[in-house]
Amino acid sequence: MRERDGADAVTLLRRYSSAAVDSATDVASRLPGTGTARRLGRLWQRHVRERPDQYRASITFPTAPNRPSVGEVHGWIEALEHAFEGRLDVYARHGSVAVETDPVSAELFDEAEFDAICERIEDGYSGSHSVAHLKKWRRNDGRLVRAHVIVPVKPLFPRDETGDQAGARAATEIEAD
């Protein structure tokens, strides 16, 4: 019979050490108090520090003749590209353009620039849509991520041009945990 080719010693050592680390991590995660410490750490980071490890955004831009022009939307996408260090994907959909960003570390993310972009988007859709801006805290690979979901929403009933604009901002700045 032919002898099987075996893995070299270094590969075997890596496999065994990886399995040992996985087993140790599994056992440590089952110790009493581990989950409580993790939850307290997340609460501290979220409510006391108010500083996530990473940021990400998901934005939908409705397109039509009475909405912002393609050039305006393209300008917003370019500005988002600078704010998120080029880590974004753009999808063309029927009647809209969607932008999804990858998580970007807090050190690379320019929050002031992102807020300015959000204001430009709100101004661009102010005549036809209310802009819903949902901010969520999420866990991703052990890191705390601040996710922004921005969607211009067409109102169910047309706005009264003579009335006050207080109701126009009812859907903006929704905070979710």
Image (cartoon, rainbow, N blue to C red):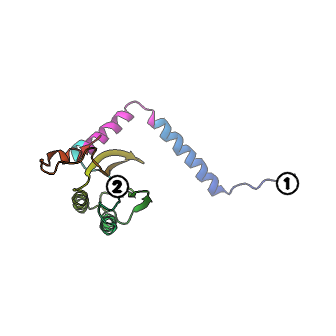
Q: Position of residue 159 (x, y in %)?
A: 20, 48
Whether the residues at callouts 2 and 1 have beta carbons within 8 Å, the answer is no
Q: Position of residue 141 (x, y in %)?
A: 42, 48
Q: Number of numbered discs present?
A: 2
In this figure, which residue is indicated by the disc labeled 2? 59
Which residue occupies 52% across, 45% down? 21
Q: Which mark is residue 107?
A: none
Q: Position of residue 82 (x, y in %)?
A: 31, 67
**Which class describes the residues within 10 Å of circle 1: few (<14), some (14-19), or many (20+)?**
few
- Mark whose residue sits in front, 2 or 1: 2
- Who is closer to the viewer here, 77 or 148? 77
In this figure, which residue is indicated by the disc labeled 1? 2
**Which class describes the residues within 10 Å of circle 2: few (<14), some (14-19), or many (20+)?**
many
Left or right relative to 10: residue 111:
left
Amino acid on which disc 1 is placed: Arg
Which residue occupies 22% across, 61% down? 116
Which residue occupies 31% across, 45% down? 136
Residue farthest to the right? 1
Is 154 located above or below residue 107 in the figure? above
Q: Is residue 135 magenta?
A: no
Q: Which residues are magenta?
A: 29-46
> Sequence order check: which comes first, mark 2 or mark 1?
1
Q: Secondary structure at mark 1?
A: loop
- Who is closer to the viewer here, 38 or 10? 38
Q: Position of residue 25 (x, y in %)?
A: 48, 41
Q: Quadrant of residue 170?
A: top left
The chief SS type of the magenta part is: helix
Q: Quadrant of residue 95?
A: bottom left
**Quadrant of the snapshot with the C terminus:** top left
Q: Is residue 33 magenta?
A: yes
In space, the residues marked 2 and 1 are separated at their CA atoms by 60 Å
Q: Secondary structure at mark 2?
A: strand
